[in-house]
Image (spheres, coloured by chain):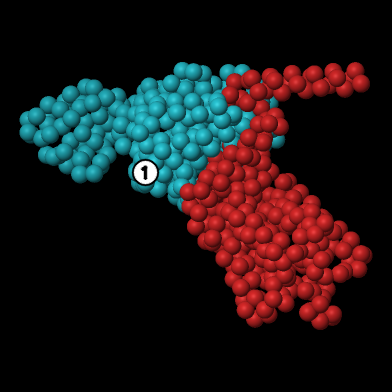
Chain colours: A red, B cyan
């Protein structure tokens, strides 16, 4: 108990000293890191969204277009699946779009080099950018959640769906950032991220139930993390009943993907050039 | 064995860098010491290796071999310690169109962990000292190239970091704006900060540098103060002649160079006096002046726009 108190006091003193040290030499306490993340997200996302609201519409065009076609072709039968697909597509798209933005920041604006030669760690930069990207899709997500409510899909298990959404955002942001640090030409940034986005959100059963895919080919769908996102969301919103072992498997795969990509982005992304 | 002395800001020993599979090293075997509290300039043509050296010191690029210590820390293995104490404006950095100069400086400071309440007055002070106050709230896409460049410089200078790296910071600036940046750099030096500058503007190097390293083909050819570099030339005087002479007849007076349509003779005072008298007899136009950094640079590096190959340092 006493030892803990001493440790806390020492920690307080260190924090106080760090906070009071000359500003140019400010060390990276937890609050300083939060401020850094906040700054990156504010100036790369919130402020840009306020000044150029057109980006908000642009970032949600594809998912809502697919949703519209599903509604026209399938009527109300598939609209619930379409809403889930649009949610996943928007979140994964935001993460991957981070990759394109980070590539431009590195190659066109040289902003990544500016950040490298500063106390800002790569992981804080990535979190800041991903929060910034979230700004652009927040209005669309709000619309989708209202539609979930309208279709009476919000039940006691809705918090599970929120956790799935969070995992979708974290995994795709980490993947997008990792990918961005290896893209050599800025003109490739949008094509690479758009291709990956299509591979992850259009081909796998994200906008439709997995039952539609013939049994022998389903294993291919399970390779995509977005399939597991979809399965878990469909279950959490009461659209589909899946066996408990399949749900458990999807949680494990999804968490593993998220942890793997986060570690990859935090430790293996190219922050300093080799 | 590196000393990591308290008086040394950057110390490199046999530092080399070769990019990827390139056969030509961008930087070869650079050994130098940059004193704290000084403005040190790397002067060289495009592709000479200035940016590559700067990027290795700023922890943006890993060296291929050799050692580099920055403010007493190993710039390869102790990046965290180094990065807390430095700031850098990369070459060809660009501003974000939807942000104002004030936003840019605030972004720079708050992303380093500054509190907003500390960052605000610092941002205003820096913008004012660079003459950017009237444009503080103008979106960067509405600013001239010079104002955008000044904004980038403000982002680094506002941090008051111990060591600031500026890679060709005054490119595109008008003479008045350049002088504002120079003044701020000199003020920071007087406040004990160290600045590593790269430039190919000789007047800039001459005006503000405490020491200059002339770089060519990845190597340092000569280091010294402006006076030391000038005195390294055995000629003390130059005579610029615009008409009335052929190059062949000037060789007897000293080293002859073709500068545009004019001829320049590097010589001593006695020969310069004779040549000036001869020019008066022939009613030719001649201008006599002491040798400049320009002469030292051309003597060491030669003429021509770029070095052989490319400096990939900013890619």
Query: Of helix, strand and loop, which one carries label 1?
Result: loop
Above-or-below relation of B141 to B3? below
On the picture, is A89 further left or further right than B283? right
Q: Which residue is mark 1?
A: B143
Residue A242: image location, x then y, percent: 87, 69
The quarter of the picture where residue A74 lies is bottom right
Residue nearest the observer in this picture, A148 or B112: A148
**Can you say which quadrant of the picture contains the N terminus of chain B?**
top right
x%, y% of residue B12? 59, 31
Q: Give the residue displayed 37% in from the left and 46% down from the top.
A: B142
- Toward the viewer: A264 or B1? A264
Name the image quarter holding residue A14: top right
| Residue at x 71%, y 50% (from the top left corner) | A265
Say which residue appears at 84% left-offset and 80% top-offset. Answer: A216
- Determine whether, in the image, residue B40 is placed left or right of residue A271: left
The answer to whether residue A218 is left or right of residue A203 is: right
Residue drawn at x 67%, y 23% as measured from the top left: A18
Residue B281 image position (x, y, % from top left) = 7, 30
Q: Is residue B83 above or below residue B36?
A: below
- Quarter of image, res B46: top left
The reply to whether residue A223 is in sight is no
Position in image of residue B129 (x %, y %): 40, 26
Q: Is residue A159 left or right of residue B16?
A: right
Chain designation of label 1: B
Q: Is residue B122 visible?
A: yes
């Amino acid at each position: 108990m006493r030892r803990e108190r001493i440790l806390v006091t020492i920690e307080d003193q260190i924090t106080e000293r760090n906070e009071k040290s000359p500003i140019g030499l400010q060390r990276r306490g937890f609050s300083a890191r939060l401020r850094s993340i906040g700054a990156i997200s504010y100036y790369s996302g919130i402020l840009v969204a306020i000044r150029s609201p057109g980006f908000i519409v642009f970032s949600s065009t594809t998912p809502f277009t697919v949703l519209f076609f599903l509604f026209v072709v399938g009527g109300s039968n598939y609209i619930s699946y379409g809403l889930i697909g649009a949610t996943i597509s928007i979140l994964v798209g935001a993460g991957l779009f981070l990759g394109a933005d980070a590539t431009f920041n590195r190659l066109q604006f040289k902003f990544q080099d500016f950040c490298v030669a500063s106390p800002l760690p790569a992981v804080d930069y990535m979190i800041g950018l991903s929060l910034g990207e979230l700004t652009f899709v927040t209005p669309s997500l709000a619309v989708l959640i209202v539609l979930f409510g309208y279709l009476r899909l919000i039940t006691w298990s809705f918090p599970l769906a929120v956790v799935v959404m969070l995992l979708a955002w974290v995994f795709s942001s980490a993947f997008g950032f990792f990918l961005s640090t290896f893209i050599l030409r800025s003109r490739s940034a949008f094509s690479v991220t758009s291709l990956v986005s299509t591979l992850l959100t259009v081909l796998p059963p994200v906008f439709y139930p997995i039952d539609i895919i013939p049994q022998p080919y389903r294993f291919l769908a399970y390779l995509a993390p977005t399939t597991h996102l979809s399965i878990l969301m469909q279950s959490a919103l009461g659209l589909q009943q899946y066996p408990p072992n399949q749900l458990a498997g999807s949680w494990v795969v999804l968490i593993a993907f998220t942890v793997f990509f986060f570690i990859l982005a935090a430790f293996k992304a190219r922050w300093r050039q080799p | 064995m590196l000393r990591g002395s308290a008086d040394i800001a950057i110390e490199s020993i046999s530092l080399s860098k070769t990019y990827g599979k390139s056969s030509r090293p961008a930087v070869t075997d650079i050994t130098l010491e940059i004193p704290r509290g000084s403005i040190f300039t790397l002067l060289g043509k495009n592709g000479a290796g200035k940016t590559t050296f700067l990027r290795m010191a700023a922890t943006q690029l890993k060296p291929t071999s050799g050692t580099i210590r920055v403010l007493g820390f190993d710039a390869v293995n102790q990046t965290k310690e180094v990065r807390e104490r430095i700031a850098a404006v990369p070459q060809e950095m660009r501003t974000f169109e939807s942000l104002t100069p004030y936003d840019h400086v605030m972004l720079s400071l708050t992303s380093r962990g500054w509190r907003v309440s500390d960052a605000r007055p610092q941002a205003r002070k820096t913008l004012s000292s660079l003459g950017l106050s009237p444009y503080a709230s103008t979106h960067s896409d509405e600013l001239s190239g010079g104002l955008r460049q000044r904004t980038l410089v403000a982002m680094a200078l506002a941090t008051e970091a111990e060591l600031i790296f500026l890679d060709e910071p005054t490119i595109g600036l008008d003479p008045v704006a350049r002088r504002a940046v120079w003044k701020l750099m000199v003020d920071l030096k007087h406040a004990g900060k160290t600045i590593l500058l790269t430039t190919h503007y000789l007047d800039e190097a001459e005006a503000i540098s405490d020491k200059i390293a002339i770089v060519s083909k990845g190597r340092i050819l000569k280091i010294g103060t402006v006076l030391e570099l000038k005195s390294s030339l055995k000629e003390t005087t130059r005579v610029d002649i615009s008409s009335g002479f052929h190059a062949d007849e000037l060789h007897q007076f000293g080293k002859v160079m073709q500068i545009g349509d004019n001829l320049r003779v590097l010589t001593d005072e006695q020969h310069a006096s004779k040549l000036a008298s001869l020019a008066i007899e022939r009613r030719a136009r001649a201008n006599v002046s002491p040798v400049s950094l320009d002469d030292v640079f051309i003597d060491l590096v030669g003429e021509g726009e770029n070095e052989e190959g490319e400096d990939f340092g900013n890619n």
